[in-house]
Image: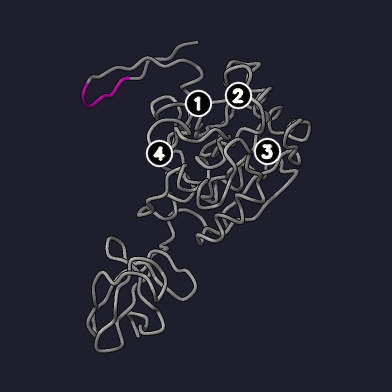
């Protein structure tokens, strides 16, 4: 069935199919990242790094991580596959906290998305290849980020696509999604409990950045979160800066460097 929609203000008309007519008006605002192309071509592993970087950029817009940087940072061998526990631990170290959930239902999926939380899920590659979603011959789990749901489809950011035109919010039928999500337990290389996903502990839209005020006469800014790291600048007492990430007592000032938070107070204090 086809539908015609007319904008009564401008007179513009658009023709839609039954599938597009039910497509969600809004999907969760997660940046798309491909597992191929610049920043990813050196990888010979699965889509786990790209999916994790999507979540990282959704919650930390200033993040400079690429799939290659992520895989190198967390010491993934060149031909290995991430597991959900490994991805969870890596994201946690970057201050993206998630719950690892198994045996989820479609109702769980709906409630999670309605709460503004994208899911990093593992699907079975062979099932996706059978419907032409992936190229044949792929092995191991295929990781995606779930950003939307309607009566017919689940909408996924699929890192196997080269760009966001094809890969962002890609529609997969509920039936095929459920089958691929359930059959990860039979994956020969990396079995994963069926219907598993990483669920962020907070929803998108919450302010993750906080502001601090320098509380000593001069505070050094360093290139990395360590006392021995190169000094790249200074802040003066009373200056207020944004902190977008915290690691072991250090705070990252976007575009500037790292400062010791013990020499600061909350900006409102």
Q: Secondary structure at mark 2?
A: strand
The kind of secondary structure element at disc 1 is loop
Residue 22 badge? 1
Quadrant of residue 47 within the rendered picture: top right
Magenta region: which residues? 6-10
Q: Are marks 4 and 2 in contact (CB under 8 Å)?
A: no
Q: Earlier in the sequence, mark 3 or mark 4?
A: 4
Q: Give the numbered dot on residue 78.
A: none
Q: Residue at x 47, y 46 (%)?
A: 53
Please state which of residues 9 and 45 is positioned toward the viewer in this rendering.
Answer: 45
- Using the rendered view, name the quadrant where residue 99 is placed: bottom right
Report the disc number at residue 106.
3
The mark nearer the N terminus, 4 or 2, is 4
Q: Is residue 102 above or below residue 46?
A: below
- Crowding near pointer 1: few (<14 within 10 Å), some, many (20+)? some
Q: Nearer the viewer, residue 76 or 172?
A: 76
Q: Nearer the viewer, residue 81 or 6?
A: 81
What scheme was used to colour the molecule?
one colour
Q: Which residue is mark 4?
A: 39
Q: Earlier in the sequence, mark 1 or mark 2?
A: 1
Image point 40% across, 39% down: which residue? 39
- Dot 1 or dot 3: first in sequence order is 1
Tell me, yes or no, whether the two marked residues, 1 and 2, touch with CB atoms within 8 Å: no
């Amino acid at each position: 069935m086809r539908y015609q929609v007319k904008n009564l203000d401008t007179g513009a008309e658009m023709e839609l199919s039954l599938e597009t007519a039910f497509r969600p008006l809004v999907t969760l605002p997660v940046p798309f990242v491909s597992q191929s192309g610049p920043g990813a071509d050196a990888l010979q592993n699965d889509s786990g790094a790209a999916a994790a970087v999507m979540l990282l950029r959704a919650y930390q817009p200033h993040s400079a991580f690429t799939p290659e940087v992520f895989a190198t940072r967390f010491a993934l061998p060149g031909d290995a596959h991430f597991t959900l526990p490994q991805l969870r631990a890596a994201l946690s170290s970057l201050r993206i906290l998630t719950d690892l959930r198994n045996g989820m239902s479609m109702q769980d999926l709906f409630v999670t998305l309605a709460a503004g939380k994208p899911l990093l899920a593992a699907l079975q590659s062979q099932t996706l290849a059978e419907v032409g979603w992936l190229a044949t011959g792929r092995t191991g789990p295929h990781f995606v980020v779930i950003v939307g749901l309607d009566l017919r489809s689940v909408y996924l950011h699929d890192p196997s696509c080269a760009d966001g035109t094809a890969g962002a919010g890609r529609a997969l039928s509920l039936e095929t999604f459920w089958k691929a999500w359930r059959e990860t337990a039979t994956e020969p290389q990396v079995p994963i409990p069926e219907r598993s996903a990483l669920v962020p502990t907070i929803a998108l839209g919450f302010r993750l950045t906080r502001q601090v005020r320098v509380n000593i006469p001069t505070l050094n800014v360093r290139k990395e979160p360590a006392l021995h790291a190169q000094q790249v600048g200074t802040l003066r007492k009373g200056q207020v800066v944004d902190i977008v990430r915290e690691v072991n007592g250090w705070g990252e000032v976007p575009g500037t460097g790292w400062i010791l938070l013990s020499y600061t107070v909350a900006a409102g204090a």
